[in-house]
């Protein structure tokens, strides 16, 4: 299997609508920046390939209806080897047909986000959520499959194989947590 490197950028590239998770929409709607996620590797022909995806990096957490919401997420420089593919994961903050997630560590995951981050309201407390579409997370996973070169028979088995191989690496560049903002 071939190695794939991902880098979550430190400078915003766009914006998204969100709400304070998990308390619900009682706190209202917020605006958060989106960031670039550069994915780089080598395809089966030996050609270096890179693609940039728009992602959530930070989110707004509201622990209860009465708590003060705050911006959360990984801000420090850090690198992790992806722990595994979680095929049964489903997005908790919105309806999504794109299932599964990559486990960075603990509850920090890479999973589906809004196809249109300016109109679809998803919530996050620090997961990397793949935006844009239609089916942006599926396109992201197809790109990973093409770069990784798994040999399993089905797409589902290929994703599991990539997760077990420990060949995906993600680096978070140091970034300042954004201010809590209303749209």
Image (cartoon, rainbow, N blue to C red):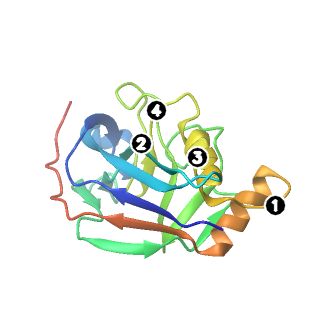
Q: From the image, state whether disc 2 or disc 3 is nearer to you.
A: 3
Provide residue 122's location: percent of width, then percent of height.
43, 40
Judge left or right: residue 130 versus residue 180: right
Neighbor class of circle 2 (other Cα within 10 Å; few <14, some 14-19, many 20+) is some
Mark 4, secondary structure of its residue: loop
Q: Is tag 4's residue or tag 2's residue first in the polypeptide sequence?
A: 2
Mark 1, secondary structure of its residue: loop
Mark 2, secondary structure of its residue: strand
Residue at 45 percent of width and 55 percent of height: 40
Q: From the image, state whether disc 4 or disc 1 is nearer to you.
A: 1
- Tell me whether circle 4 and circle 2 mark residues in contact (CB < 8 Å): yes
Mark 3, secondary structure of its residue: helix
- Tell me whether circle 4 and circle 1 mark residues in contact (CB < 8 Å): no
Residue receiving disc 3:
143
- Tell me whether circle 4 and circle 3 mark residues in contact (CB < 8 Å): no
The Cα atoms of the two marked residues, 1 and 2, are separated by: 26 Å
- Tell me whether circle 3 and circle 1 mark residues in contact (CB < 8 Å): no
Q: Is residue 171 above or below residue 44?
A: below
Residue receiving disc 4:
132
The Cα atoms of the two marked residues, 4 and 1, are separated by: 28 Å
The Cα atoms of the two marked residues, 3 and 1, are separated by: 16 Å
Neighbor class of circle 3 (other Cα within 10 Å; few <14, some 14-19, many 20+) is some
Looking at this view, is 166 or 180 the one in front? 166
Q: Is residue 167 above or below residue 36?
A: below
Provide residue 2's location: percent of width, then percent of height.
60, 66
Q: From the image, state whether disc 4 or disc 2 is nearer to you.
A: 2
The Cα atoms of the two marked residues, 4 and 2, are separated by: 8 Å
Residue at 21 percent of width and 30 percent of height: 183
The Cα atoms of the two marked residues, 4 and 3, are separated by: 14 Å
């Amino acid at each position: 299997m071939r190695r794939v490197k991902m880098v979550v950028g430190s400078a915003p590239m766009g914006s998204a609508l969100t709400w304070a998770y998990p308390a619900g929409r009682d706190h209202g709607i917020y605006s958060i920046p989106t960031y670039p996620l550069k994915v780089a590797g080598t395809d089966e022909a030996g050609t270096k390939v890179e693609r940039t995806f728009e992602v959530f990096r930070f989110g707004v957490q509201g622990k209860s209806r009465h708590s003060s919401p705050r911006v959360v997420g990984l801000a420090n420089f850090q690198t992790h080897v992806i722990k595994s593919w979680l095929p049964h994961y489903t997005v908790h903050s919105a309806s999504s047909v794109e299932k599964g997630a990559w486990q960075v560590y603990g509850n920090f995951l890479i999973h589906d986000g809004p196809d249109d981050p300016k109109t679809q309201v998803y919530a996050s407390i620090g997961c990397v959520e793949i935006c844009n579409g239609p089916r942006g997370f599926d396109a992201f996973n197809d790109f990973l499959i093409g770069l990784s070169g798994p040999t399993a028979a089905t797409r589902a088995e290929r994703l599991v194989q990539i997760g077990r191989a420990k060949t995906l690496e993600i680096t978070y560049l140091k970034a300042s947590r954004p201010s809590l903002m209303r749209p």
